[in-house]
Amino acid sequence: MLYAYMRETHERPIAICTPRSQLCALFFALLSLGVQSARAQDPLIATENRSASIVARESKAPERFVVGCDSGDITIEIDATLTDSRVEAVFQLVGRSASDLANRKATIRLFATRTADDSIVVEPVLPDGIRAGERVDIIVRTFAAGDTSMRAKSGAMKATGVRGKLRLRGGNGAVMLRECVGPIDVHSAHGAVDIQDATSDVHIASKYAPVSLRYAEGADAEFKIETTNGPVTVSVSAAYDGAATLRTTAGGIVLHDTAKRMRTPRIGDTVAQVELGAGVAQSIVETSNGTVVFEARAAVVAPTTAPK
């Protein structure tokens, strides 16, 4: 066996290295290079903002929007104090190197323009599409929104106060609608659907998430809900006039008759037919695996002021 030792000379000590110590030094040198290489390959992340303003039409009629995004949330907000529409987009970008990230920041853009049919089309533009880890969140603020279409492959879609036909196509993200006046058509794969204060016909097609629909007071409209795997909750106002058929393959049926006017010509563990009033409305709820909860609310009585 060889041993390391120090040999004293007249000038200075000289270190004698064994083959084992040389191998150790080489190992740690290679390990250090590997760590540095891995760090060099780590993706770089940056956030960039883009915005656009769209001048309103002379008529000041509610704007029609077509908004799409592959990855990121879409939100539509109504602000009656606005005179024009404004779109804001927050890009979260991933670069493979510092120069690649700088180039990406310089080449992204927000497409937001009025088309020939007077619709406002909004969509983020990235040079080679959305990369893994990237997203673009879009917020549309306007004085009034009419017919609106939204598409998000991976991200939530939210809207409040839209007055017109509302069409949403989602892949992996929640849908949240509040106080929207007009027909609603929602297709969602892996996101919960929550609609509050609806006033018109509603169609919901969902696969793997819960669905909740509540009608505004005084609303009388039909609904059709189809879901593969998830509970469904529907609450109708005292004005609802018609029938509703509720079906589930693996789940239960729960009825809440707050209004005390519900008739059930057919009721069982997995199917129920409910009648309210004498109207011709025919609504349907169908789910393969989930409980169906149906509520018929009583009329809301406005509080009276006692005489002084």
Image (cartoon, rainbow, N blue to C red):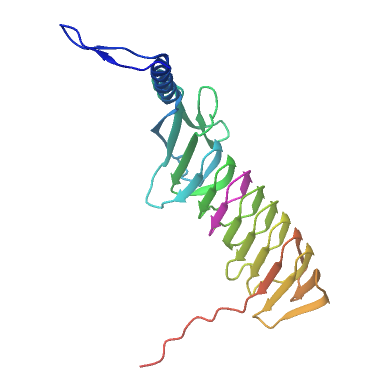
Span highlighted in magenta in the image: 164-179
Q: Position of residue 109 (x, y in %)?
A: 45, 27
**Is 17 situated above or below 38?**
above
Q: In this view, which residue lies farthest toward the bottom? A: 308
Q: Is residue 239 visible?
A: yes
Q: In this view, which residue lies farthest toward the front? A: 1
The answer to which of 99 and 81 lies nearer the viewer is 99
Q: Position of residue 277 (x, y in %)?
A: 74, 76
| Picture mark count | 0
Which residue is found at the position 77% from the left and 79% from the top?
A: 263
Residue 286: say if magenta.
Answer: no
Q: Is residue 165 left or right of residue 140?
A: right
**Is 130 situated above or below 17?**
below
Which residue is found at the position 46% from the left and 50% from the top?
A: 77
Q: In this view, which residue lies farthest toward the top? A: 10
Image quarter (top left, top right, bottom left or bottom right) of the C terminus = bottom left
**Is 65 situated above or below 254?**
above
Q: Is residue 106 visible?
A: no
- The quadrant in which residue 194 appears is bottom right
Residue 165: say if magenta.
Answer: yes
The answer to which of 254 and 283 lies nearer the viewer is 254
Q: Position of residue 172 (x, y in %)?
A: 61, 45
Q: Position of residue 167 (x, y in %)?
A: 63, 47
Image quarter (top left, top right, bottom left or bottom right) of the N terminus = top left
Q: Is residue 232 left or right of residue 65?
A: right
The answer to which of 82 and 92 lies nearer the viewer is 92
Which residue is found at the position 79% from the left and 64% from the top?
A: 247
The answer to which of 82 and 227 lies nearer the viewer is 227
